[in-house]
Image (tube, grey):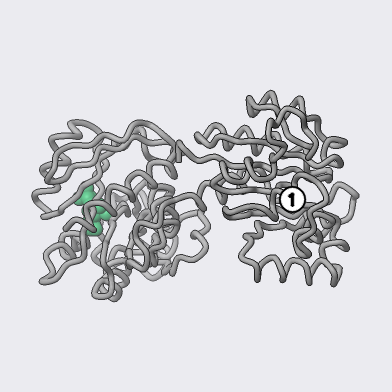
């Protein structure tokens, strides 16, 4: 990602003010950005703002004397890994659909030899207009990626589809589109989240796990071109688009869902915090409170990962170990005990529920620390490591 370079094209629309935040988020992730603006865009946000944030002069005219060969439309596109138009106005979309090239940005798009992504932003009637529908269908047929739009309250006070996606969502899509397709067609089975073991109709025992790490890994695997089967315990998260998700509650249900899918999986990543025990006889009805001590009989749950890793023909197995102390020692012990080619260790107090984490990878080649970062960045780094080890087997 560090070497990625994009042209961020801004066209005339009120959502142009959000392009500044998008630019900031992209540069934060190591993307270098050259901004190109239409004349209309300069009425909504100034080139000075965009120059300040990108550290590069903004290009907005075909006749810019600063470009020595007067070929900005060619130079800018050849240097870019992608062109992103955000916001893309209805007028600009119409131009793209028809191959018009009457200003710098449209000429640049026509002359490009790299992917083009657009984030439409317009009034809901403009978005629904048959002309715009035709134009969007044409862009999709031409292989242009259309990000959004979202629905909701519009600047004009109306409500409907046409809002530009939020800068955070756009930055995620853009960075995702750069991820190397290291695992095309590989089937990856992932467990995520906690499990919940019922005591009675309303109570249960569970582990603390938000599911964020497992869901981020599922996303990173999808970005790499893999097919993802996600078996998830109860979480508040939305499953990544494109994952085949099975929602479960108990460890027994998670076990069953994993075993159902394991034969067709190439890689198994067990991120779930599986409860170690279930209640011997959960009560169907709510147990009435009393002052007498209550004894619960706890029966050990099967170890899903250990059972998968010892199958006759197992997938490439990756385990997680959340420890509260002695991470290096306990994690390597766990890797040996469960017979895993790769184990990912993290410190429980730092990891649970947080958006950031810090990982240590243990495999036959030694120890590989992944320094503190947000969980999606770590998931991408981990998936690159897994892809390397898996393909080199
Ligand atoms: O709980 P423990 O520290 O042993 O978990 C280590 C790894 O084993 C994790 O990857 C976890 O998902 C997996 N595991 C499992 N089934 C269990 C317990 C743990 O798959 N019953």
**Picture layout, residue 389 above or below residue 242:** above
Assign a secondary structure to mark 1. Answer: helix
Report x, y in % for residue 20. Answer: 70, 34
In the rendered structure, the answer to whether residue 75 lies left or right of residue 11 reads left
Residue at image location 69% in from the left, 30% down from the top: 68
Residue at image location 63% in from the left, 25% down from the top: 55
Which quadrant holds residue 362? top left
Graded by Cα atoms within 10 Å as few (under 14), some (14 to 19) or many (20 or more), the crowding at tag 1 reads many
Whether label 1 lies within 8 Å of ligand 1 gets the answer no
Along the line of sight, which residue is nearer the eye, 187 or 283?
Answer: 187
Instruction: Read off the residue under disc 1.
Output: 107
Report x, y in % for residue 192. Answer: 37, 56
Q: Quadrant of the N terminus?
A: top left
Residue at image location 83% in from the left, 51% down from the top: 102
- The answer to whether residue 288 of the structure is visible from this angle is no
Q: Quadrant of the C terminus?
A: bottom left
Along the line of sight, which residue is nearer the eye, 122 or 263?
Answer: 122
Which quadrant holds residue 167? top right
Residue at image location 75% in from the left, 43% down from the top: 10
Report x, y in % for residue 220. Answer: 42, 53
Q: How many numbered markers are drawn?
A: 1
Which quadrant holds residue 345? top left
- The answer to whether residue 331 of the structure is visible from this angle is yes
Along the line of sight, which residue is nearer the eye, 167 or 79?
Answer: 79
**Picture layout, residue 228 above or below residue 318:** below
Along the line of sight, which residue is nearer the eye, 271 or 64?
Answer: 64
In the rendered structure, the answer to whether residue 12 lies left or right of residue 356 reads right
């Amino acid at each position: 990602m560090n070497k990625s370079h994009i042209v961020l094209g801004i066209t005339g629309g009120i959502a142009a003010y959000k392009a500044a935040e998008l630019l900031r988020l992209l540069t934060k992730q190591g993307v270098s950005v050259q901004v190109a603006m239409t004349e209309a865009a300069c009425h909504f946000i100034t080139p000075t703002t965009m120059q300040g944030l990108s550290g590069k002069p903004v290009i907005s005219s075909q006749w810019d004397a600063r470009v020595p060969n007067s070929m900005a439309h060619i130079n800018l596109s050849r240097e870019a890994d992608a062109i992103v138009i955000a916001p893309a106005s209805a007028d600009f979309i119409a131009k793209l659909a028809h191959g018009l090239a009457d200003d710098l940005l449209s000429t640049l798009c026509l002359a490009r030899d790299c992917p083009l992504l657009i984030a439409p932003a317009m009034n809901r009637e403009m978005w629904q207009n048959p002309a715009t529908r035709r134009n969007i269908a044409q862009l999709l047929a031409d292989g242009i990626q259309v990000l959004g739009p979202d629905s909701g309250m519009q600047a004009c006070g109306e409500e409907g589809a046409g809002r530009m996606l939020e800068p955070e969502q756009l930055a995620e899509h853009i960075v995702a589109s750069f991820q190397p397709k290291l695992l095309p067609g590989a089937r990856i089975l992932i467990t995520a989240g906690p499990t919940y073991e019922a005591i009675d109709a309303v109570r249960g025992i569970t582990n603390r796990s938000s599911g964020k790490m497992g869901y981020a890994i599922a996303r990173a695997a999808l970005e790499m071109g893999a097919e993802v089967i996600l078996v998830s315990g109860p979480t508040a998260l939305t499953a990544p688009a494109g994952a085949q998700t099975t929602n479960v509650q108990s460890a027994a249900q998670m076990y069953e869902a994993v075993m159902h899918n394991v034969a067709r999986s190439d890689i198994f990543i067990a991120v779930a915090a599986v409860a170690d025990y279930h209640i011997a006889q959960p009560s169907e009805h709510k147990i009435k409170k009393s002052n007498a001590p209550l004894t619960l009989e706890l029966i050990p749950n099967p170890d899903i990962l250990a059972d998968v890793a010892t199958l006759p023909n197992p997938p490439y197995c990756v385990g997680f170990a959340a420890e509260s102390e002695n991470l290096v020692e306990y994690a390597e012990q766990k890797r040996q005990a469960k017979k895993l080619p790769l184990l990912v260790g993290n410190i429980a107090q730092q990891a649970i529920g947080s958006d950031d984490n810090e990982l240590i990878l243990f495999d036959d080649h030694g120890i590989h620390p992944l320094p503190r970062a947000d969980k999606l960045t770590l998931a991408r780094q981990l998936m690159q490591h897994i892809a390397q080890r898996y393909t080199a087997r």
